[in-house]
Amino acid sequence: MSAPATLPEIAKLAREQMHKAVENTKRELAGIRSNKATTALLDLIRVEAYGSQVPLNQVGLVSAPEPRLLTIQPFDKGLTQAIEKSIRDSNLGLNPASQGNLIRIPLPPLSEERRKDLVKVVHKLAEEGRVAVRHARTEALHKIKKVEHVSEDEKTRAEKETQKVTDEHIKQIDAVIQAKEAEIMEV
């Protein structure tokens, strides 16, 4: 891939990379457990099925019928044991139980210590997101400096605009983090 030659192309690419960093952070945070049942909690779980590792949502219908309960309806009853094993092995602290063609996963309330641990994980993921945004900024600034046939004023303006976009994306990550932290610490 060749480097973008114009300032608008560089700005567009940087904005896209920053947006991806924010979206990735949101997606990773969705998989962190809070006190509310959410199907996203199980998104990263993979099940041994048909000779390979398959995402859980491809072998069963995942739903959250109650605030502290997740259910999975396997598409193939033969995979019930494999689904339960994958959930138990996931380090989410969940204990699934089969009832006929339905796997029920009650969510135990989080202890204070566990909530604090989860907040630390949230902050770590947030920092990774911020680093990705700043990396996109650094890349864009490097490319701006190399652009030829453009005045210094235009380069300076492009650098300031890049910083402004960076700040906006960092604020988005911070807002997502605050919301997730409040959700986790809610008793």
Image (cartoon, helix red, strand yellow):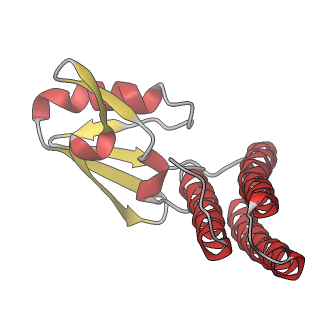
Q: Nearer the viewer, residue 137 or 129?
A: 137
**Residue 153, image x and y in percent?**
88, 82
Q: Is residue 42 left or right of residue 78?
A: right
Q: Quadrant of residue 164?
A: bottom right
**Residue 29, image x and y in percent?**
61, 55
Query: Looking at the image, is 13 positioned above or below residue 58?
Result: below
**Residue 172, image x and y in percent?**
71, 73
Query: Looking at the image, is 115 positioned above or below residue 9?
Result: above
Q: Is residue 139 left or right of residue 59?
A: right
Query: Looking at the image, is 50 positioned above or below residue 162?
Result: above
Name the residue at the top extreme: 51
Q: Residue at x 32, y 51 (%)?
A: 71
**Residue 9, image x and y in percent?**
59, 70
Q: Nearer the viewer, residue 138 or 28?
A: 138
Q: Is residue 124 left or right of residue 34?
A: right
**Can see residue 150?**
yes
**Can see residue 34?**
no
**Quadrant showing the C terminus:** bottom right
Q: Residue at x 33, y 46 (%)?
A: 104
Q: Residue at x 73, y 63 (%)?
A: 147
Q: Residue at x 50, y 38 (%)?
A: 94
